[in-house]
Amino acid sequence: MGKFWEERLKHDRAQLKAARESVGKDVLLMIDAGTIWNNKLAAAQEILPDLKKINVCWLEEPFGNLSLEKYKKLSKAKPSIALAAGEGCHNFTQAELMIKYAGLKYIQADAGRIGGITAAKQVAELANAAKVSYVNHTFTSHLALSASLQPYAGIRKDAISEYPIELKKLAQDITRTKILPDKNGFIHLPEKEGLGIEINAEALRKYLVDAEIKVNGKTIYYTPEF
């Protein structure tokens, strides 16, 4: 297939145009580069005019996590395209640096990576104060989705959410509760206590694998009764 925007420019331009045509002019369209350019600033800048033509909402992860200088320079390049990043942050401090110094318009935090709901909420609050939009990073299960939505509580302006579409069978089975879009396409925090998600323990039995961990002959873990 080759690398996006490095080895098949004509094909990639056609793909971008087709993406916009397929969703229509009024739908938000985001492009995720998956850190493909690493530290190649000039290569990333080359795509900006094409992204402007199709009116993208953001360009996501053109570079690796904490490539602050490259992000900042790209954020100031013309034509101006909003940048999104942060899913690779593993603690609040990394996200703080991205918010303060990378020139982002959107900060993406994964509650499962960044240190839990509390750390993700701190990121959301800092982003709100810095006029940067907060977006969750979630692609696994509705249990993870509920956890990742908690930081949005009390922040009305941030309405974009990553939503897991093609769930693995385990991710489907793990919960009885599903967070489904309403008629307008919005999803909402569950109103029950905790994460508001009911675990389907019975459905998980088939995924159990017997395991035992020993250190110096002492068993420190074994598969529990379920």
Image (spheres, grey):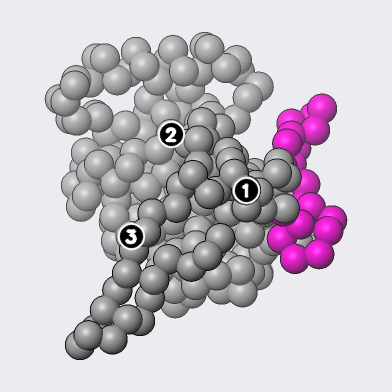
Q: Amino acid at mark 2?
A: Ile
Per the rendering, the mark at residue 65 is: 3
Residue at image coords 33%, 60%: 65
Total tally of numbered discs in the picture: 3
Q: Locate residue 102 relative to residue 186 in the image: left or right.
A: left
SS of the residue under disc 1 = helix
Q: Residues within 10 Å of mark 2 (few under 14, many from 20)?
A: some
Residue designated by label 1 = 202
Front residue of this view, candidates 211 and 78: 211
Q: Amino acid at mark 1?
A: Glu
Question: Which label's residue is closer to the chain start, 1 or 2?
Answer: 2
SS of the residue under disc 3 = loop
What segment carries the magenta color?
179-197
Q: CA distance from mark 1 to mark 3?
A: 39 Å
Answer above or below: position of 39 versus 112.
above
Residue 98 at least partly seen: no
Circle nearer the viewer, 1 or 3: 1
Quadrant for the C terminus in the image: bottom right
Quarter of the image where one finds residue 23:
top right
SS of the residue under disc 2 = strand
Question: Which label's residue is closer to the chain start, 2 or 3?
Answer: 2
The stretch drawn in magenta includes residue 195: yes
The stretch drawn in magenta includes residue 169: no
The answer to the question of whether label 1 and label 2 lie on touching residues, with beta carbons closer than 8 A, is no
Residue designated by label 2 = 31
Q: CA distance from mark 2 to mark 3?
A: 17 Å
Residue 31 in percent (x, y) is at: 43, 34
